Image: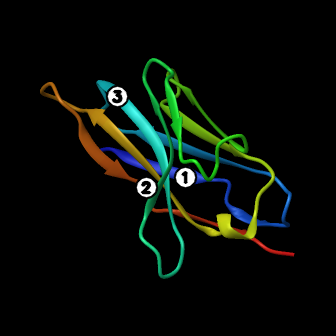
Amino acid sequence: QVQLVESGGGLVQPGGSLRLSCAASGIILSIYTMGWYRQAPGKQRELVAIITSDGTANYADSVKGRFTISGDNKKNTVYLQMKNLKPEDTAVYYCNADIRVGAPGGDNYWGQGTQVTVAS
């Protein structure tokens, strides 16, 4: 059983910064991708950023230049550094990962979500 545990959410003022962490645990043979999604009230869940095992990162246009995703392969952990936060960044942020636990191919996992609120 694989678990993704997120941390680092909270309340921050506009222009502030937060760093989210997500650690994967369990029987893990390899991790193909790890990423962050977010869901604001009344909106669909959307991709924020994703990083592959070789370090290739992709971002939603709305966060480019403000957010940075990084990973620590030894710790099976992914981070999301968020700077210059805006009220529209307010959402529940979910960690997501494609992980090989047995036969070739990845299974998709979600974390429980962490609330990020940007307000003055």
Q: Secondary structure at mark 3?
A: strand
User: Please, is residue 58 above or below residue 22 in the view?
Assistant: above
Residue 6: mark in rendering: 1
Residue 42 percent location from the top left of the image: 48, 82
Q: Image point 36% across, 29% down: which residue?
A: 31
Dividing the picture into quarters, in which one does residue 92 lie? bottom right
Q: Quadrant of residue 98?
A: top left
Question: Can you name the residue that lies furthest to the left here?
Answer: 103
Disc 2 from disc 3: Cα separation: 16 Å
The number of callouts visible is: 3
Residue at x 30% of width, y 35% of height: 99
Q: Is residue 52 left or right of residue 18?
A: left
In terms of sequence position, does the residue under pointer 2 or pointer 3 come before the other? 3
Q: At x 85% / y 67%, what residue is drawn?
A: 13
What element does badge 2 sit on? loop
Residue at image mark 3: 32
| Residue located farthest toward the bottom when viewing the structure as drawn | 42
Mark number displayed over residue 111: 2
Residue 100 picture location, percent across and down: 25, 30
Q: Contact (CB < 8 A) between labels 2 and 3?
A: no
First reached walking from the N terminus: tag 3 or tag 1 = 1
Q: Which mark is nearer the camera, 2 or 3?
A: 3
- Tell me the amino acid under the disc marked 1: Glu
Q: Is 6 or 19 nearer to us in this picture?
A: 19
Q: Amino acid at mark 2?
A: Gly
Residues under numbered marks 1 and 2 in contact, where contact means CB atoms less than 8 Å apart: yes
Amino acid at pointer 3? Tyr
Q: Residues within 10 Å of mark 1 (few under 14, many from 20)?
A: many
Is 90 above or below relative to 18?
Answer: below
Image quarter hosting the C terminus: bottom right
In the foreground, 18 or 45 = 45
Tell me the element at label 1.
strand
